[in-house]
Amino acid sequence: MEKLTAGDPQRIGAYRLLARLGAGGMGQVYLARSDRGRTVAVKLVRKELAEQDEFRNRFRLEVAAARRVGGAWTAPVLDANTEAAVPWVATGYVAGPSLQDIVSGPHGPLPARSVRILGSGLAHALQDIHGAGLIHRDLKPSNVLVTIEGPKVIDFGIARALEAVTGAGLTGTGGLVGSPGFMAPEQVRGTPITPACDVFCLGSVLAYAATGHLPFGGGDAAAVSYRAVHEEIDTA
């Protein structure tokens, strides 16, 4: 979490911005609070994306679908303005560290029982997401937050909008939506995907949680993606 900068807006919609939570291919994410005191995470779309009609159309459809996902295992979509000059979406704020921070920190890999509990929660989250007609596309340790109520999945439902503008180099790996080392082989190949790709990502996330190292090793994105397609996952 970082302080707001001089270039950040003070408000987005009905929400007063408090701090920066992070940024990604889609845009900047802020910690914010509603006039009624609810704390939320607001994602503000990048201006260059907002200027592209195809992205806006996809974003509009994906936000509408994401609203249908319950909040038991995910950060629910609470509010959005897909018609604003710069579109935004607000989700429930989840207070808890990411799985990435836990495993890469002093705690290290999770014990077997914790991995089983994590796997059950993530499977329920994917069931809710797929039940709403969505595919996450980017399930990875940094998109899994660990809370006293169990794991919560974030950043679901609107990643597909980026596929409309992959030619602009807005995603990290050759225009693909996903993260090297956790993407399914069909994502790397650029072939049509199904909910099964999220199940592959789930296995990769659990392997990381149990072992503490990346399931297809480190190195540059191209090498990691090649191993994901042609080699077995490393569970040692």
Image (spheres, grey):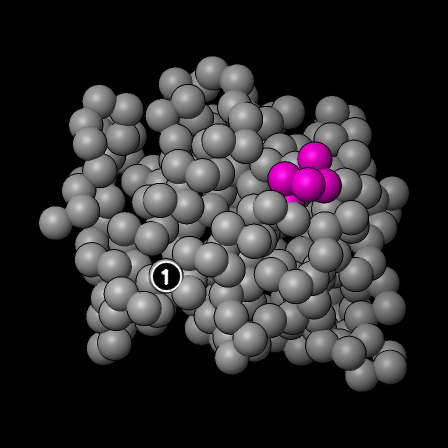
Relative horizontal placement of residue 117, taking residue 6 as reference (left or right) = left
In the image, taking residue 26 as reference, residue 142 lies left or right, namely left
Residue plotted at (22% across, 22% down): 230
Whether 207 is drawn above or below 8: the answer is: above
Secondary structure that dominates the magenta span: helix
Label 1 sits on a secondary structure element that is: helix
232 or 103: which is nearer to us? Answer: 232
Residue 20 appears at what percent x and percent y? 58, 69
The residue at 41%/22% (across/down) is 186
Q: Residues within 10 Å of mark 1 (few under 14, many from 20)?
A: some
Residue 5 lies left or right of residue 2; in this view the side is right
Q: Above or below — where is 19 with respect to 209?
A: below
Where does residue 15 sit, x and y in percent of width and height? 80, 70
Magenta segment: 129-133
When asked about the image quadrant of residue 103, the answer is bottom left
Residue 130: in magenta span: yes
Residue 88 seen by the camera: no
Q: Where is mark 1, residue-wise?
A: 116
Residue furthest toward the left? 236
